[in-house]
Image (cartoon, rainbow, N blue to C red):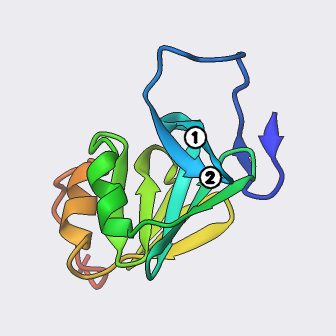
């Protein structure tokens, strides 16, 4: 199944209780959200909006920096002062931007070195495009 909004694949294998999750207070109850279902988190002031793989969104009252401390480093990476991404869904990297589905995200200067390290780019020598033959 594919999420038409983000053009990402959705794997629905029933409930997955053994996988990592976080409970978030939303609309007067605690909601369980699996890490693998989170595409990205967008912060704005003292609010965070979680964007799930099925296209749903959850807005909670918490700062992005505080949320980053609650998420596993092996799945989530901060790329900008306003965005934390599930790096497993990053499919394109160009210049100072990354893409998940159809959505582009800016990469801040301070976050770029860690992003390059996490995405496992090979250490190949860059060749000058004006090579003499």
Q: Are marks 1 and 2 in contact (CB under 8 Å)?
A: yes
Residue at position x 26%, y 76% in the image: 133
The residue closer to the viewer here, 130 or 4, is 4
Classify 10 Å Cα crowding around label 2: few (below 14), some (14-19), many (20 and above). Answer: few
Badge 1 is on which residue? 30
Residue 121 seen in the figure: no
State the count of labels: 2
Q: Is residue 48 left or right of residue 66?
A: right
Q: Which mark is residue 26?
A: 2
Residue at (19%, 56%) from the top-left corner?
Answer: 124
- For image coordinates 28% across by 85% down, the residue present is 130
Q: Position of residue 45 (x, y in %)?
A: 44, 82
Query: With respect to residue 129, does 9 lie above or below?
Result: above
Q: Is residue 133 above or below residue 85?
A: below
Q: In front: 25, or 9?
A: 25
Would you identify the image quadrant in which residue 12 lies? top right
């Amino acid at each position: 199944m594919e999420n038409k909004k983000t053009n990402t694949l959705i794997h629905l294998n029933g409930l997955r209780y053994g996988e990592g999750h976080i409970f978030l207070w939303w609309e007067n109850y605690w909601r369980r959200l699996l890490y693998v279902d989170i595409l990205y988190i967008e912060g704005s002031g003292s609010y965070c909006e979680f964007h799930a793989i099925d296209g749903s969104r959850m807005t909670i009252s918490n700062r992005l920096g505080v949320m980053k401390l609650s998420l596993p480093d092996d799945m989530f990476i901060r790329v900008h002062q306003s965005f934390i991404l599930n790096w497993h869904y990053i499919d394109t990297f160009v210049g100072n931007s990354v893409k998940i589905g159809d959505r582009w995200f800016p990469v801040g200067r301070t976050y770029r070195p860690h992003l390059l390290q996490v995405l496992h780019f090979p250490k190949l020598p860059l060749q000058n495009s004006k090579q003499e033959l």
